[in-house]
Image (spheres, helix red, strand yellow):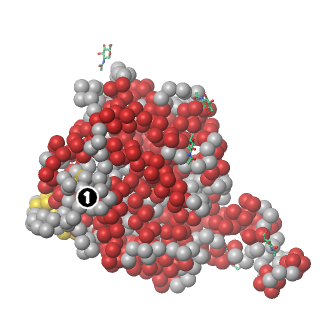
């Protein structure tokens, strides 16, 4: 690379420093191209090793993965170092400037001290090990892992005490064991990020959205959408009080956090049987029909692939079908949490999912396929642009598709229901089912990173970790701890994304913008009926619009990408509100004035309610992983 000091001298400013920087944009382009070829290779090696480990957990496979992850970090450091030899901030080519800004922005790989970088990786794998190997013993003969047993227990049990034992037991074997590790992790992560020029890790994560008003925008959005949640909450609370007895509920108005059909109360679809508005209507749960038709995991992915194809989008390549892991194998240990994988060689794209034959998993299949479709669409972009326009976009693609797939009209088209009834009562039932997925999730999606950002910034120190967590849970979600919590507990880390260190606000963003995309694509396909009846199946106009945006990857600022699909350049809650409008009205009628809860958590009981003598153990199974940042993981 040649040095063109001449140019710099002419400018007569800070010459001595600038003289060392390379201003030649041709040389810079050459450099970026070279880096891209190498990056494909280094990423491919790392992803391959991570895949091998995730689909076959052994000591040997773990060591191979750790080695590749350190190589990748080393490579990122070297690239950032070499890139900073260029005077890229003054390049005239906007795109080249954007590429360089990505090359120098390397996250925790910026850690100057290698030993500390290794320690950071080590802590993260230790936390994942604790999370992945925890088992709750409800009796001497009944020890349950999270997947699938505790998850199923929360879905099916309506036994207050059994749920409570499982809820508390899980937190004892997961979060509670990680508090010291997490504090150390926060300090190291911040130190690494500081070397990148950000205030703290939270600030770094928010920088991906490239929106100066991001935090305020989120507050506004949340406030706009809150009435929908408050109404769903009030109706659910009333039904659960009938089921469990009002004496089990605090006077402050929150719902005990273990009664919502999910370990974290994050989605409530498993309560549908309790909450169904009109009981005499046909069910729109297609699980029994899928089983009757002998559906397989492969069949579920074929259904999804066919939908994308019907829009004129890209079909899954052979390698997807040959190498994905679509069912849980029984000859080895695997990481079951569903995820989508880009191998960075422009050929190999895979899903790893322990698919069960249920409607819920059919939706997850579409979610993961959405990630793969994005990978396929942007595969010819440089590696630094192979990502969502922002992280929320990546999470939204498959969900947009499944908004169409879940309509009764569509389920009839693909033969999963017969004789769709189309009246107001059927609509309300359908929207209730959707609300338990989409509305129930909003405060949860919102608060996780509110907590994490305040921890990263130092606002919430270690001796307030759990208190802050429950402040947010009580205030935003309106759920309360069913047993006394103290700073001995560490409840945030009982949720996968905290030990796995996956940022979470992306899911909140996705749940808002997927309705904007849905509305825009419905408009493009010239459907003018209510949004919750729209199905974009086989509509190539909608498909083209979506593809055009996905092809961009992250090469343009996200508002420009959003503009291409929706003509909007902001996150906006009105599409979501429009979709649920009939249900919102119905809920308001049901609830009257019996809505809302106090901000503060209920005062803890003076007596100790945790009287169950559970014998809780954690199996010292071996398991760990590093640098999951490349993967797309289910919420
Ligand atoms: C799992 O990995 C081990 C290496 O640690 C290997 O020997 C074994 O064949 C692998 N099993 C499968 C099913 O790939
Ligand atoms: C960085 O620069 C050094 C010295 O010129 C070179 O040896 C190395 O290959 C470069 N690395 C990358 C990833 O560009
Ligand atoms: C770099 O660009 C900035 C902003 O456009 C300008 O103010 C500055 O003079 C430029 N510096 C050099 C050395 O070109
Ligand atoms: C499902 O499989 C069973 C057993 O193999 C068979 O008897 C039945 O006909 C199949 N049903 C359908 C709808 O294919
Ligand atoms: C996938 O498997 C089929 C059948 O075994 C084979 O013909 C094809 O070459 C494979 N394709 C890839 C990309 O591995
Ligand atoms: C669907 O409707 C038709 C005609 O009304 C009826 O003959 C058939 O039994 C119905 N099927 C189901 C599964 O309800
Ligand atoms: C699509 O949006 C345009 C502009 O807002 C509007 O004029 C048109 O009526 C919409 N089309 C449908 C089918 O809703
Ligand atoms: C959201 O979109 C609606 C129209 O759909 C518009 O009236 C409103 O101003 C937008 N809100 C924001 C905050 O941009
Ligand atoms: Zn995802």
- Toward the bottom, the furthest residue is 16
Residue 501 % position (x, y): 43, 66
Residue 417 % position (x, y): 35, 26
The residue located at (48%, 84%) in the rendering is 115
Please say if 142 is above or below 571.
below
Name which quarter of the figure residue 232 lies in.
Answer: top left
Q: Is mark 1 within 8 Å of ligand 9?
A: no
Sort mark 1 into few (<14), some (14-19) or many (20+) by Cα contacts within 10 Å. Answer: many
Name the residue nearer the viewer: 9 or 321: 9
Q: Quadrant of the C terminus?
A: bottom left
Please say if 455 is above or below 327.
below
Left or right, residue 172 beside residue 549: left
Please say if 404 is above or below 474.
above
Q: Is residue 344 visible?
A: no
Name the residue nearer the viewer: 189 or 312: 189
Local SS, label 1:
strand
Q: Is residue 18 visible?
A: yes
Name which quarter of the figure residue 83 lies in.
Answer: bottom right
Q: Quadrant of the N terminus?
A: bottom right
The residue located at (78%, 67%) in the rendering is 91
Residue 317 % position (x, y): 54, 44
The residue located at (59%, 75%) in the rendering is 196
- Toward the front, the furthest residue is 593
Return the residue at label 1.
480
**Could you tell me how many numbered marks the image carries?**
1
The residue located at (55%, 71%) in the rendering is 107
Left or right, residue 187 beside residue 85: left
């Amino acid at each position: 690379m040649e040095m063109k000091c001449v140019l710099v001298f002419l400018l007569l400013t800070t010459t001595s420093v600038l003289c060392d920087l390379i201003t030649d944009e041709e040389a810079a382009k050459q450099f970026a191209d070279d880096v891209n070829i190498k990056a494909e290779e280094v990423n491919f090696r790392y992803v391959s090793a991570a895949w091998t480990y995730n689909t076959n957990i052994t000591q040997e496979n773990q060591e191979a993965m750790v080695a590749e992850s350190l190589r990748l970090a080393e490579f990122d450091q070297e690239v950032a170092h070499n890139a900073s030899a260029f005077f890229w901030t003054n390049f005239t080519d906007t795109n080249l400037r954007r590429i360089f800004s990505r090359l120098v922005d390397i996250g925790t790989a910026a850690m100057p001290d290698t030993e500390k970088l290794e320690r950071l990786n080590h802590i993260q794998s230790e936390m994942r090990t604790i999370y992945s190997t925890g088992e709750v013993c409800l009796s001497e003969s009944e020890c349950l892992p999270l997947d699938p047993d505790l998850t199923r227990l929360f879905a099916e049990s309506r036994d207050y005490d059994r749920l409570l034992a499982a809820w508390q037991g899980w937190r004892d074997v997961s979060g509670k064991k990680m508090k010291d590790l997490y504090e150390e992790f926060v300090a190291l992560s911040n130190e690494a990020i500081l070397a990148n020029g950000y205030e703290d890790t939270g600030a770094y994560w928010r920088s991906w959205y490239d929106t100066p008003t991001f935090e305020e925008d989120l507050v506004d959005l949340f406030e706009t959408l809150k009435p929908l949640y408050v109404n769903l909450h009030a109706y659910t609370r009333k039904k659960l009080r009938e089921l469990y007895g009002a004496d089990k509920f605090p006077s402050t108005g929150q719902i005990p956090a273990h009664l919502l059909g999910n370990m974290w109360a994050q989605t409530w679809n498993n309560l549908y049987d309790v909450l169904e508005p009109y009981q005499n209507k046909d069910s729109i749960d297609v699980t029994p029909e899928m089983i009757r038709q002998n559906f397989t995991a492969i069949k579920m992915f074929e259904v999804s692939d066919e939908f994308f194809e019907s829009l004129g989008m890209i079909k899954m390549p052979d390698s997807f079908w040959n190498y994905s892991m679509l069912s849980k194998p029984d000859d080895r240990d695997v990481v079951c949490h569903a995820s989508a994988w880009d191998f960075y060689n422009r050929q190999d794209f895979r899903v790893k999912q322990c698919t069960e034959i249920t409607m819920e998993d059919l939706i997850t299949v579409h979610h993961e396929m959405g990630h793969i479709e994005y990978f396929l669409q942007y595969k010819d972009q440089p590696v630094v642009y192979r990502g969502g326009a922002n992280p929320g976009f990546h999470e939204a693609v498959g969900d947009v598709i499944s908004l169409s797939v879940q309509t009764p009209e569509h389920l009839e088209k693909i033969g999963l229901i017969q004789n769709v009834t189309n009246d107001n009562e059927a609509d309300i039932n359908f929207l209730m089912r959707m609300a338990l997925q989409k509305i129930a999730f909003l405060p949860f999606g919102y608060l996780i990173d509110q907590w994490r950002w305040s921890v990263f910034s130092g606002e919430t120190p270690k001796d307030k970790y759990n208190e802050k967590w429950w402040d947010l849970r009580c205030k935003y979600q309106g759920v309360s701890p069913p047993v006394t919590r103290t700073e001995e507990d560490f409840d945030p880390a009982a949720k996968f994304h905290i030990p796995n260190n996956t940022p979470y606000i992306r899911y909140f963003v996705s749940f808002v913008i997927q309705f904007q995309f849905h509305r825009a694509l419905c408009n493009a396909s010239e459907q003018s009926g209510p949004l919750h009846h729209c199905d974009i199946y086989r509509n190539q106009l909608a498909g083209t619009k979506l593809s055009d945006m996905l092809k961009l990857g992250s090469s343009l600022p996200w508002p420009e990408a959003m503009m291409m699909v929706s003509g909007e350049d902001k996150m906006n809650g009105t599409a979501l509100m429009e979709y649920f409008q009939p249900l919102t009205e119905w809920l308001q009628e049901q609830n009257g004035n019996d809505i809302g809860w106090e901000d503060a958590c209920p005062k803890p009981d003076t007596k100790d309610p945790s009287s169950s003598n559970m014998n809780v153990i954690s199996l010292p199974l071996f398991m760990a992983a590093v640098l999951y940042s490349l993967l797309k993981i289910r919420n």
